[in-house]
Image (tube, rainbow, N blue to C red):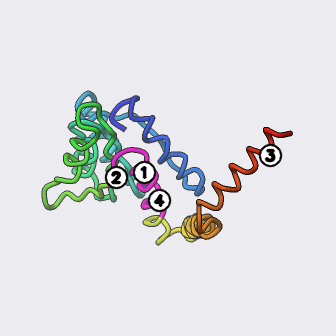
Amino acid sequence: MGSNSDWETMQHAAATLASLGVAHETRVVSAHRTPDLLFSYAASAESRGLEVLIAGAGGAAHLPGMTASKTVLPVLGVPVESKALKGLDSLLSIAQMPGGIPVGTLAIGKAGAINAALLAAAILGAKHPAIREAFRKFRATHTKNVLAVPDPSVALVKKIAKQKRRKRA
């Protein structure tokens, strides 16, 4: 992530990866404040055994693109919501990479961080069966949760009735 403040968003990527059993590291590496560190980190990622990089950044959001320029590994960009433009600036900065330097761009904020982790797991799953199976179970659980409550209004009515019974008791 580009700064410590991005952790509020990027913690969701880390938590999702952890829940799937995907080994990962988290690091603050700024494209603007620590460019030498960024270049070293990205250039050495493959030799250090990393297989997919998730880069979250707000504002000008140069981190994902600059990371992608220094590695052939897949780079997934997460636009962090900014105060000025609610993350639209970040989204456009990451999505508008020139041809030849691809960055997979996800949604702004928490959803993007979660989906970046899930997309990383899907990519890694092509090579690592255990990750593929963890991702498959994740998807099956989400399907089961949706099917368990086909009509949320029924659940709401039950919740209200339960609250009324508690008040009377």
Q: Residues within 10 Å of mark 4 (few under 14, many from 20)?
A: some
Residue 116 left/right relative to 37: right
Identity of the residue drawn at 80% across and 41% down: 166
Residue 155 left/right relative to 85: right
Q: Is residue 112 magenta?
A: yes
- Tell me the distance, in whole angstroms, between the alpha carbons under discs 1 and 4: 10 Å
Secondary structure, mark 1, is helix
The x and y percentages for residue 75 are: 32, 54
User: How many numbered marks does the figure carry?
Assistant: 4
Seen as rendered, the residue at the extreme right is: 169
The x and y percentages for residue 147 are: 61, 70
- Tell me the distance, in whole angstroms, between the alpha carbons under discs 2 and 3: 42 Å
Q: Tell me which numbered mark, 2 or 4, is placed earlier along the sequence.
A: 2
- Answer yes or no: do the residues labelled 2 and 1 have beta carbons within 8 Å? yes
Q: Which residue is mark 1?
A: 111
Identity of the residue drawn at 29% across and 55% down: 105
- Answer yes or no: do the residues labelled 1 and 4 have beta carbons within 8 Å? no
State the mark number for residue 107.
Answer: 2
The x and y percentages for residue 72 are: 28, 58
Residue 49 left/right relative to 97: right
Q: Which residue is mark 3?
A: 165
Q: Which residue is mark 4?
A: 118
Secondary structure, mark 3, is helix
Image quarter (top left, top right, bottom left or bottom right) of the C terminus? top right
The x and y percentages for residue 165 are: 80, 46
Secondary structure, mark 2, is loop
